[in-house]
Structure formats: C-alpha cells, structure tokens
C-alpha cells in the first residue's frame, strides 16, 4: 500500500467528519452565539480569560497532542497498518471528537466547571470525590511520563565516551567544553540536535511571556498571527545557532521548576501564548509532512494485518489502549473542561476548538503510521524508540520538499518535545486543580473553611504535593510509567463519557452518540487493567519479574484505578436511569 492513498483517505474522512458530523452535533445540542460564556461571566485574569478562537485552538491542540499520537500508532503497528488506520479514523471521529466536544460543551454550559463538578451536580458528591482522586493520580502519571520524555529530548550529553581535549565537536569551544564538565560532573559526548531543541524550547518560554503581554494589547488576530510566526522563526533560528548542553538530571529539576510556575501563573502570561506559539510549529510540521507524503509517495513496508495475537499481545484490548491520543483520550476531556472551556469567547468557537483539534490530532496519528510504515524493513519495525522512528520517517518526507536531513531531524525532535512540554503545562495545572477540588464542593463556604481545607486548597501547596509525587515517579523512568498511561487514559475517557451522557440526559439533550463509545471504552480499559493486575501480581509472586519495584508500582496504581473506575462507573450508570431534570 502506498502512504499517499492512506493520507488521501484520512483527509477525506476527517475533513468530511468535521463539516458533516461536527456541525450536526452542534445543531443537535444547540449553540447560543449570544450567550455570555464563562470566560466573561467568571473572568478572574488567572484561569477564566477570554481568548480568540485561534489562541484557544492553539492551547487545546498543543495540550492534547502530546507524545501519545506519535507513540501509540507506532507501537500498535505490530498488528499491521489496517487495524491501526481503522481505529484512528473511526475512533477519532465517533469516539474522540465526540468526547472532546461533549466535555467542552458540558463545561461551558456549567460555568466552565470541570468534569468533576459536573459529576457532583448530576451524579453526586461521592462520585465527584472519587473522580477527583482518579484525575489526580492520572495527572501524576502524565506529568511523570512526559517529563521524562522531555528530559530525553533535552539531554545534552550521551554518556558513552569521555570528551577529551581536542576531541570536542567543532561547534563547542574549549571554554564551553570545560564548563560542560562542571555542569555534568564528567566528560561526555554532546548531542547537537538535543542542545538545539533545548535552546529553542527555552527561547519559546521567554518569547511566550512577551507574546502574552502583546496579545492582551493587540486584539487583531491577523497581526497576532504574523507576530507569532515571526517570533517562532526567530526562536528556531537562534536555537539552531546557540545550543544549550545540560545533563538529563539537571533538566529534570529545571523542567519541574518550570511546570510548577506554569501551573499557578495566570493563563494569559504563559499557558495561552506558549501553546499558541507552539501550535504554529506543530501545525506547520503536520502540513509539511502531508506535503512530503504527497511528493514522496512512500510505500508501506508493513503487512496489512499480522493476526489477532502478535508478540504476546492480543488485538483486543491492546490496540484500543495503545492508540489513545489520535483516537480517543480521556486526557482531552480534562483539557476541554479544565482549561480551554474557561477561555471560550463565544459558544460557536467550541466546535473548531474541541472537535477540530481532535481531528487534527488524528491526522498526526496518521502521519505517525505512515512514518513507521516507510522506515520498516520487510514488515519489521526498527528497534528504536517511537520518537526516533517518527523523526526519521518524517525527516525523510521533508527532504522531498527541500529541507536538509539534519535540520529536519532537529525540527521534528523539537516538535515532539513541544508536544510533550505543552501537555505538561496543562496537566500540571489540571492535577493541581483536581487536588484542590477534592476538598471542596459546590456548596462549600470558601470564606469559612477549616485550616486543613484552606491549606489543601492553597494553589502553592497543591502544586508542591502534586509535582513532588510526579518527580519521584519520573525518577524511575518513562518505561515503568507508560504501560499504565494507556489504561488510565482510556478509563478516564469512559468516565468522562458517562458524566457527559448523564448531563445530556438530565438536561433533556440528545446524548445517544455517547453510549457506544462509553460502553466500549469501559470494556476495553477494565479488561486491560484486569490483565495488568493479573500479570504483574503473578510475576511478583513467582519472582519472575526483572523489575520488582517498577512492577509493584504499576500493580498498585492499576488496582487503585480499577477500583475507582468501577465505583464511579456504577454511580454514573445508575444516574442515567434516574428521572430527567430541567434543561440547563
């Protein structure tokens, strides 16, 4: 199969889905263009900040498109390209886009409140408390996993051979080499691409703060677009010329300090402008990749279908858990209802920001599928990390439109890092808010809270607690965390779909399109968590596991998520059978 044909099919399906199905849902649920959105009604200059469509879209897309749509399709490609393609397209349109739109819609109609508050209002306080625990644990997993991804793309050294005098690369002066030894504590080989990525990313952060101030002054979206693109190009150019070399351990500390600041700063200062800036990079990468595929017409060196059981993994439920982002992801519901819904200026903007951003992420997953198919040899996927496979495949496409291989690799690595880092910005804030929301209800008198409650709802305290646990998990490594991400993510999706289904039923809106995704994701994720609990516990008891500490951690999280998921699901499904309320 030619990758061009897959790309054309994806463009037709995803484009048609937005124009037909997306607009159908907007008309069915009802969009009031004259309604005062929570961004204005609850405006506080911190979380509730009205923003233009392109700015909120940039935040939504940059936040949801983490490492998932790149890792998932490449990992699942062991089953063949056909099941991966079908799940991305079907899941992206009828599962993911519907969930994202429904989550944002329910939030905007409820003063920009999170899914947790919606559960409290329509299901009950106990369900909300349990959901907030689930959300907090999930946020910790995401922060730990994505922080490790960013550290690996930032790390300035490969600790393989000593960097002796006279052996340093031409782009490093002897003085810099001496400084590097001080920073790392040992001689190391510098990694040019990672240094350039780290430098550019730091410049993005500094530029985003300045851009945030500019966006508060200038409200012309075309001027904002031009300024953002110019700033983006300048940052990339300077980053390529002046790489930064710091060890992975040092970067881990720096990154956690950054996300701690980002999670409590007003969204217009850093979150909005940084995601807005990065969205142009990410969209440009997708557009360039599409053009590269159209010109290169790569052959898919993968089998169409390799069977139901491959490398000890069964198609069900492995495929549907592995490909989360790009098809359906519970994390999206947290962004849609936790941050983006508080920035919507007009209800009509919900469709492009939620439904549209999800379909754009599905396109990224399609590119990842074509990338792994183009670099595979005789149906065998290279024994490399998923980001490296993606970078090599896409870099091959970009060379066809005249971009040098070396620059292509740096830009793609930068994009992958940007995906993960922008997700960190949002999920750290979401985790902090989830921790705070656990201790308060909609009827809590915030002026007369007890001392413990006041401390636990303090944004500085909640940020420290959340990130401290995530930092400890990040130390054990990405590989020990990621296996749980897919299951937790998809179970979160099922819970969000249940909450939205209850909201639509209680407010007398059509929610039938949520039922099949809701039931399927419950079956998929509970099955996968059950398998994880069985395999990890068996390995620990029989002492056949090579990493008892990592497996024990995964087992503990899997059991906790399974129990919480079951209890919240039962509460939600019971609420679906209750008498309907008045329309909100």
Image (cartoon, grey):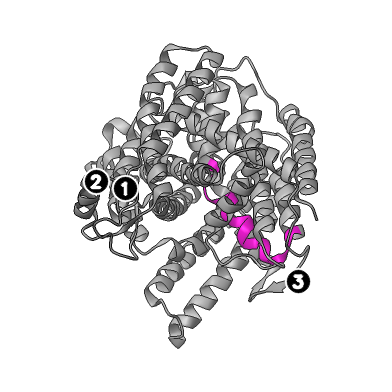
Q: Is residue 107 in view?
A: yes
The one of 193 and 556 positioned closer to us in this rendering: 193
x and y percent of residue 414 in the render? 47, 43
Badge 2 marks a residue whose secondary structure is helix
Per the image, the residue denoted by label 1 is: 245
How many angstroms separate mark 2 from mark 3 (CA)?
Answer: 53 Å
Residue 210 vs residue 319: left or right?
left
- Seen at 51% across and 64% down, the residue is 483
Disc number for residue 339: none
Badge 3 marks a residue whose secondary structure is loop
Residue 449 vs residue 310: left or right?
left
Q: Give the mark, 1 or 3, whose residue is nearer the N terminus.
A: 1
Front label number (1 vs 3): 1
Q: Give the mark, 2 or 3, whose residue is nearer the N terminus.
A: 2
Per the image, the residue denoted by label 3 is: 307
Residue 357 vs residue 147: left or right?
right
- Seen at 50% across and 39% down, the residue is 63
Q: Answer above or below: position of 304 versus 457.
A: below
What is the quadrant of residue 566 in the picture?
bottom right
x and y percent of residue 563 in the render? 50, 64
x and y percent of residue 103 in the render? 59, 38
Disc number for residue 176: 2
The quarter of the rendered structure image containing the C terminus is top right
Badge 1 marks a residue whose secondary structure is loop
How many angstroms separate mark 2 from mark 1 (CA)?
Answer: 9 Å
Magenta stretch holds residue 186: no
Residues under numbered marks 2 and 1 in contact, where contact means CB atoms less than 8 Å apart: yes
Magenta residues span 64-81
The one of 413 and 433 positioned closer to us in this rendering: 413
């Amino acid at each position: 199969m030619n990758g061009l044909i897959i790309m054309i099919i994806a463009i037709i399906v995803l484009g048609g889905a937005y124009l037909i199905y997306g607009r159908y849902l907007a008309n069915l649920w009802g969009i009031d263009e004259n309604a005062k959105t929570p961004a204005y009604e609850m405006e506080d200059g911190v979380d509730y900040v009205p923003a233009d469509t392109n700015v909120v879209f940039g935040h939504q897309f940059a936040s949801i498109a983490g490492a998932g749509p790149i890792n998932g399709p490449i990992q699942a490609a062991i089953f063949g390209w056909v099941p991966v393609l079908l799940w991305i397209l079907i899941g992206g349109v009828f599962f993911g886009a519907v969930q994202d739109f429904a989550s944002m819609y329910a939030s905007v109609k409820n003063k920009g409140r999170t899914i947790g508050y919606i559960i409290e209002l329509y299901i009950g306080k106990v369900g909300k408390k349990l959901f907030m625990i689930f959300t907090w644990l999930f946020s910790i997993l995401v922060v730990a996993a994505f922080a490790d991804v960013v550290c690996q793309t930032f790390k300035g050294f490969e600790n393989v051979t000593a960097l002796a005098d006279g052996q340093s690369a031409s782009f490093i002066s002897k003085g810099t080499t001496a400084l590097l030894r001080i920073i790392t504590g040992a001689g190391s080989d510098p990694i040019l691409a990672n240094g350039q990525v780290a430098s550019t990313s730091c410049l993005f952060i500094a530029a985003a703060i300045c851009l945030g101030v500019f966006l508060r002054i200038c409200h012309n979206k075309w001027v904002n677009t031009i300024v953002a693109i110019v700033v983006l190009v300048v940052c990339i150019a300077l980053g390529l010329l002046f790489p930064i070399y710091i060890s992975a351990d040092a970067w881990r500390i720096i990154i956690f300090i950054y996300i701690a600041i980002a999670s409590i700063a007003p969204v217009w200062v850093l979150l909005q402008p940084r995601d807005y800036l990065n969205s142009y990079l990410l969209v440009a990468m997708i557009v360039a990749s599409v053009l590269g595929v159209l010109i290169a017409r790569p052959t898919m060196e993968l089998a169409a279908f390799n069977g139901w059981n491959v490398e000890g993994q069964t198609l069900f439920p492995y495929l549907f858990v592995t490909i989360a982002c790009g098809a359906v992801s519970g994390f999206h519901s947290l962004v849609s209802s936790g941050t983006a819904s508080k920035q919507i200026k007009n209800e009509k903007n919900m469709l492009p920001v939620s439904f549209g951003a999800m379909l754009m992420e599905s396109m990224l997953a399609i590119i990842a599928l074509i990338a792994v198919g183009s670099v595979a040899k005789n149906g065998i996927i290279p024994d490399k990390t998923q980001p490296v496979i993606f970078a090599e495949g896409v870099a091959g496409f970009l060379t066809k439109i005249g971009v040098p291989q070396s620059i292509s690799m740096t830009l793609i690595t930068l994009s992958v890092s940007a995906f993960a880092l922008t997700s960190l910005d949002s999920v750290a804030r979401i985790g902090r808010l989830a921790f705070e929301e656990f201790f308060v209800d909609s009827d809590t008198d915030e002026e007369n809270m007890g001392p413990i409650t006041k401390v636990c709802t303090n944004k500085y305290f909640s940020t420290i607690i959340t990130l401290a646990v995530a930092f400890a998990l990040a130390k054990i490594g990405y590989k020990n965390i990621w296996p749980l991400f897919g299951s937790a993510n998809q179970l979160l999706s099922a819970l969000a779909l249940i909450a939205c289904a209850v909201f639509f039923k209680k407010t007398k809106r059509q929610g039938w399109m949520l039922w099949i995704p809701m039931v399927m994701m419950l079956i998929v994720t509970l099955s996968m968590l059950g398998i994880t609990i069985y395999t990890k516990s068996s390995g620990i008891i029989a002492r056949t596991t090579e990493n008892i500490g990592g497996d024990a951690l995964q087992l503990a999280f899997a059991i906790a998520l399974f129990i919480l998921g079951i209890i919240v699901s039962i509460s939600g499904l019971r609420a679906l059978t209750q008498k309907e309320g008045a329309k909100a």
